[in-house]
């Protein structure tokens, strides 16, 4: 009997894009409504730290969760967790925001390992940079929708309505993934037979094995460390740009439009940079170039300060978004290229745990530097760190 055919790629790609749209939008809501409800940089930093601290732990469990439940079921679970997070955050207190951060971290952590395991097996190796970049555009779609739609929506209705506007689509995507799980969570795709668990430490041992693999493989280790710097920079753009632009004298809606332009530039960048891999032949060098671009954009925004005009702010936001929000797809594709074929989810989870360490450190750096020199100091500091990550990738050129 011939083996069953693998299910088609496009429905899985569409579903995983939809998952990322709602997760990105959920992460984006507090920063978008912050000027309207008076959330301080410290409160936003606490929320972001809890999101990515929890995500770092959950990403490490991503491979085990996929092996146990299947990628589509994991995707449904994370959407439900995102909807629950938004419902809690709508209560409005700092305690509720902190609890929402933990719930959203539970959603955010396993999402990329699940999609990497599923799409990495369905896509041909040559197609992976484009497939993962297309999938990662879900982040920009969610963020762009939040930038353009949420500020006028919360101004016209109520800030809490921003949370509801994202929670409802998250529930719809969860239902979609549950329907698709009947086809995609079979043995052909991502659920392989496992030996009986003999120790309660088995999952931890699996993660430690993945972490040892990453740290012993110099190209993977350099990629993971650089991604920590780039992730912190991307977080700062998405969470604090709007508040910084309002602080420079622009209106809430104007700042939202500028941030929306950044997200659209990131959307175009994710696709454009993926196509560039075919021409240049090195995803690593493109990621390094984007690190240089985001670092310079952040420093430029900090130096310009209140003297920046609105057209100049729009232009700088576009450059910032194309680089700081455009690197993720080819980064994930490069991780899957370097990872052993049977350990894609495990390796991706280990790399992302290092990436999320940068996302966890980013809010703390923002809180400390903003207290000293405002958000301009935060952008400058993290811009320099992003430049260091780019230099690390340039110096480490070894292929597998």
Image (tube, helix red, strand yellow):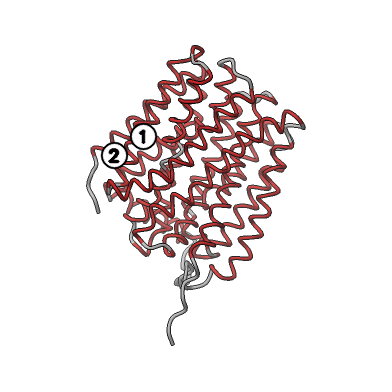
Where residue 157 sits: x, y (%)?
77, 32
Q: Is residue 73 above or below residue 110?
A: below
Where residue 8 sits: x, y (%)?
49, 67
Q: What residue do we see at 68% from left, 55% from top?
A: 172
Q: What residue do we see at 38% from left, 63% from top?
A: 124
Residue 304: quadrant of the picture: top left
As drawn, the label of residue 103 is none
Q: Are marks 2 and 1 in contact (CB under 8 Å)?
A: yes
Q: Is residue 125 left or right of residue 377?
A: left
Q: Is residue 295 above or below residue 372?
A: below
As drawn, the label of residue 393 is 2
Q: Secondary structure at mark 2?
A: helix
Looking at the image, the residue that sits furthest to the right is 157
Where residue 169 sits: x, y (%)?
67, 49
Alpha carbons under labels 2 and 1: distance apart? 9 Å
Q: Secondary structure at mark 1?
A: helix
Q: Is residue 158 left or right of residue 376?
A: right
Q: Is residue 3 above or below residue 225?
A: below
Q: Return the residue nearer the eye: 321 or 38.
A: 321
As drawn, the label of residue 291 is 1
Residue 183: quadrant of the picture: bottom right
Q: Return the residue nearer the eye: 23 or 85.
A: 23
Q: Return the residue nearer the eye: 242 or 276.
A: 276
Q: How many marks?
A: 2
Point out the frontmost of discs 2 and 1.
1
Quadrant where the image shows the C terminus: bottom left
Label 1 crowd bin: few (<14), some (14–19), many (20+), radius 10 Å: many
Looking at the image, the residue that sits furthest to the top is 307
Q: Is residue 172 above or below residue 105?
A: below
């Amino acid at each position: 009997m011939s083996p069953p055919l693998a299910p088609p790629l496009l429905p899985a790609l569409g579903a995983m894009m939809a998952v990322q749209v709602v997760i990105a939008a959920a992460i984006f809501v507090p920063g978008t409504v912050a000027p309207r409800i008076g959330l301080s940089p410290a409160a936003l930093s606490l929320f972001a730290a809890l999101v990515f601290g929890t995500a770092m732990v959950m990403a490490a469990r991503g491979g085990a969760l996929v092996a146990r439940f299947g990628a589509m079921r994991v995707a449904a679970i994370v959407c439900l967790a995102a909807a629950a997070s938004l419902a809690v955050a709508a209560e409005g207190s700092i305690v509720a925001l902190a609890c929402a951060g933990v719930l959203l971290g539970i959603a955010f952590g396993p999402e990329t390992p699940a999609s990497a395991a599923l799409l990495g097996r369905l896509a041909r190796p040559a197609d992976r940079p484009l497939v993962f970049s297309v999938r990662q555009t879900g982040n920009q779609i969610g963020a762009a929708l939040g930038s353009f739609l949420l500020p006028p929506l919360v101004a016209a209705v109520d800030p809490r309505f921003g949370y509801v506007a994202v929670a409802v689509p998250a529930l719809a995507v969860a239902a979609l993934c549950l329907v698709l799980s009947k086809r995609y969570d079979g043995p052909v795709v991502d659920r392989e037979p496992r030996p009986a668990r003999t120790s309660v430490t088995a999952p931890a041992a699996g993660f430690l094995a993945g972490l040892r693999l990453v740290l012993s493989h110099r190209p993977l280790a350099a990629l993971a460390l650089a991604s920590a710097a780039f992730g912190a920079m991307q977080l700062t753009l998405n969470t604090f740009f709007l508040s910084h632009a309002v602080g420079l004298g622009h209106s809430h809606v104007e700042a939202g439009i500028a941030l929306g332009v950044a997200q659209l530039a990131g959307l175009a960048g994710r696709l454009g940079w993926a196509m560039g891999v075919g021409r240049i032949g090195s995803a690593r060098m493109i990621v390094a170039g984007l690190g240089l671009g985001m670092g310079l954009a952040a420093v430029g925004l900090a130096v310009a300060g209140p003297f920046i005009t609105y057209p100049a702010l729009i232009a700088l936001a576009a450059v910032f978004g194309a680089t700081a929000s455009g690197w993720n797809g080819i980064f994930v594709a490069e991780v899957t290229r370097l990872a052993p074929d049977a350990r894609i989810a495990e390796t991706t989870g280990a790399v992302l745990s290092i990436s999320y360490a940068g996302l966890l450190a980013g809010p703390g750096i923002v809180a400390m530097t903003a207290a000293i020199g405002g958000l301009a100091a935060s952008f400058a500091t993290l811009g320099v760190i992003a430049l260091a990550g780019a230099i690390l990738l340039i110096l480490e050129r070894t292929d597998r």
